[in-house]
Structure formats: C-alpha cells, structure tokens
Amino acid sequence: MILSDKTIRHYLKTGKLVIEPLEEMQIQPGSVDLRLGNHYLRIAQHKAAVLDLIHKPEYEEIIQDEVVIPPHSFLLATTREYVKLPDDLTSFVEGRSSIGRLGLFIQNSGWVDPGFEGEITIELYNANILPIKLVSGVRICQLVFAELDQAAANPYRGKYQGQRKATGSRVMEDVDIKK
C-alpha cells in the first residue's frame, strides 16, 4: 500500500519515519519531494580507460550551490535531506516530471530498502542537447512510500548505510564480485 500525505505526516510526527530537514510544502498527496544538495561526484574520466565492477572508480568531487551538467553527461548528486526508514517501510525514488521534461533523468536505481538511513545519492543524466544548470535546494525527486506486510527479516544494513554526501559505487564490495 502506498502511503498518503496523512499517513506520511503521522509517521513523521511520531518519528516512525525521519526526513530532515523537511518543510511542509515538500509533502505531496502521495510522496515527499526531496531537494538537491550541494555535493556531486563525477567519474574522473582521465584516470581510467574503462570502468568495471572489480576496481573502485576514481571520482572528482564538486561542492557548490550551482552545477551545470553538459549534454549527454552523468553526475552523482545527493539530496539535502537525511532519510531514515523503519524496517517495515520501503521507498521508491522518482524523478519529478517537471524536471524530466527538460531532459534530466533522475534515478537511484529506483529503490530505497527498509531500514536504510542516510542522504539519498541520485544519479543524474542530461539526455538533452543543451547543458542543464541545477541549483542547490530545488526539489529534484520524490520518495513514494509503501508499507511491507510485516517488518523485513533482514532490513538494510549495507555498505551505503548512513551515507552523507554523494556516494560513489561500491559494487566491488559485493560478495559475488570475483577479484
């Protein structure tokens, strides 16, 4: 079941769900808008000829309130908000339609596991032929919440737990990745 604004407000008030900082206008009828932070990572393209799943990629860190994403470019960003989900609540990360209509694709693999807490790292891709300028604080994506039928037996306690700032890939830490 997807949570309504009434249930979201109740969970925020009781502390079952934590989203900080949060302004009332961010709460939508069936979601919560999250704002763009000021921390970004981009792949250090001059440091490697190819990316793979075994070696940790090198990133260039960008900390600023405005950033321009060139056409057909990829950038990791973070939300301003820190989110803490209980073990019986999951969330879908969705881009805002108004921003998608400019050609900016917003993703986070689309999913936040029950038990996760941290700032949300989002992947940004400019599919347009023009650069897109972003400003910290703009509502960039939304979280849609769904309740599990019961608390997860193994809630998220993984490698991104507690992350602050945009966080690069840690796929090479997966147990199934052969080194």
Image (cartoon, grey):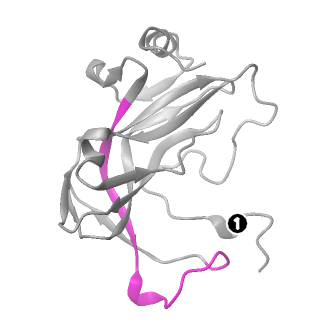
**Amino acid under disc 1:** Glu
Residue 137, by quadrant, is: top left
Residue with the mark numbered 1: 173
Residue 133, by quadrant, is: bottom left
Indicate the position of residue 30 as horizontal and vertical percent values: 43, 20
Q: Quadrant of the C terminus?
A: bottom right
Towards the viewer: 155 or 164: 155
Indicate the position of residue 65 as horizontal and vertical percent values: 20, 53
138 lies left or right of 150: left
138 lies left or right of 167: left
Indicate the position of residue 86 as horizontal and vertical percent values: 63, 25
- Residue at 48 percent across and 58 percent down: it is 167
- Residue at 79 percent across and 76 percent down: it is 178
- Residue at 79 percent across and 37 percent down: it is 154
Label tally: 1
Q: Quadrant of the N terminus?
A: top right
Q: Is residue 13 above or below residue 135?
A: above
Please tell me whether mark 1 sits on a helix, a strand or a loop: helix
Residue 162, by quadrant, is: top right
- Residue at 63 percent across and 80 percent down: it is 55
Q: Is residue 153 above or below residue 132?
A: above
Q: Is residue 88 above or below residue 170?
A: above
Indicate the position of residue 39 as horizontal and vertical percent values: 33, 56
Q: Is residue 52 magenta?
A: yes
Towards the viewer: 76 or 106: 106
176 lies left or right of 13: right
The stretch of residues the image draws in magenta is 33-55
Towards the viewer: 49 or 16: 49
Q: Residues within 10 Å of mark 1 (few under 14, many from 20)?
A: some
Q: Is residue 168 magenta?
A: no
